[in-house]
Image (cartoon, rainbow, N blue to C red):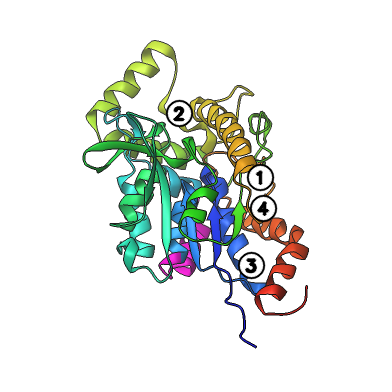
Amino acid sequence: MKQAKRPVIALVLGSGAARGWAHIGVIHELAEMGIEPDMVVGASVGSVVGGAYASGNLEPFEDWISSLSRVDIIRLLDARMTGGGFLQGNSLMGAIEQRIGNPNIQDLRIPFACVATELDTGREVWLREGSLLDACRASIALPGMFAPSRLREGKLLVDGGLVNPVPVSLARAMGGEVVIAVNLNGDLIGRHFFVHRGDEDVSDEDSERALADIEDRDSTIARWAAKMKAGFGVRLDSYISSLRKKESPDPGLFDVIAGAVDIMQDRITRSRMAGEPPDIHITPQLSHVGLMDFDRSEESIEKGREATRRERRQIEKLARALMGQRP
């Protein structure tokens, strides 16, 4: 008797800024359960982790993010008050390129695609060819934080999470028959403003030195920061308050941006996944991880593992079916 062809497994990695390191834990736990996806699709940070995995460079990428301190993160913030965003993203993408390279998407070891949003029209854009880094840079361009990317015919592209935070539809369109989706935004609304990070591993002196480096890169930033300090009593570090010890219960600028994006993405995700449900839905509990907490990779990765284990019964049932065993 002819054996049935194994269905195509698609792994969908959703948006979520620093919470995206949980995707790495999901990938590891799935592998231990015998699940190796045939394709990977991502939005925003999910595109970066997915790109590292699809290119065969997840291990060096994980080693790097596991070593990041808050000062390291601050030094990656190439701030300029031009170009449509507080951060240009060049330093960050350069650091990512050192770990995963910059292959063309069509040359990756497994099929990959990511989602971006066309700023002028709000149209969802699927990036399935060309430079992997350029595609990821477009997909992570969170408005107000990263400058938009010019990738296709001079059009401005911004964060894919604005239109499709967990792009199940893209995975189905690429031929995914069994879709495993990771939603990072399921428990966030209104909660991350009240998170206390606990003990800090970076001194105020080190933080101030890193912030001074940002100002020194561009005279425009230095003048702007000086004006803010003199005129309003607001320092540049208030714009990256998510990276530092909280001295006030009031949210910083990035906190407000994050809260607004969380609300939007939660509503969009609920709506789209109701009409485009995955076969397996993994939801790491990450409300305690803030927008810029990229130095908390260890606990985020573990939360990804925990969430995957909560879906163990469904995943093991899938694994048995894929091996031709009776569920």
Label 3, label 4: how far apart the Cα atoms are: 13 Å
The residue lying furthest to the top in this view is 231
Are the two marked residues, 4 and 2, in contact with CB atoms closer than 8 angstroms?
no
**Mark sitting earlier along the chain (3/1):** 3
Label 4, label 2: how far apart the Cα atoms are: 34 Å
**Mark sitting earlier along the chain (2/1):** 2
Label 4, label 1: how far apart the Cα atoms are: 15 Å
Q: Which residue is mark 4?
A: 281
Q: Which mark is residue 239?
A: 2
- Residue type pointed to by label 3: Leu
**Mark sitting earlier along the chain (3/4):** 3
Residue mark closest to the camera, 4 vs 1: 4
Q: Which residues are the magenta region? A: 54-69
Which quadrant of the rendered structure holds the C terminus?
bottom right
Q: Is residue 112 above or below residue 262?
A: below
Q: Which residue is pictured at 44% across the width and 54% down the height?
A: 48
Label 3, label 1: how far apart the Cα atoms are: 19 Å
- In the image, is 242 to the left or to the right of 282? left
Residue mark closest to the camera, 4 vs 2: 4
**Mark sitting earlier along the chain (4/2):** 2
Q: Which residue is pictured at 45% across the width and 28% down the height?
A: 239
Label 2, label 1: how far apart the Cα atoms are: 22 Å
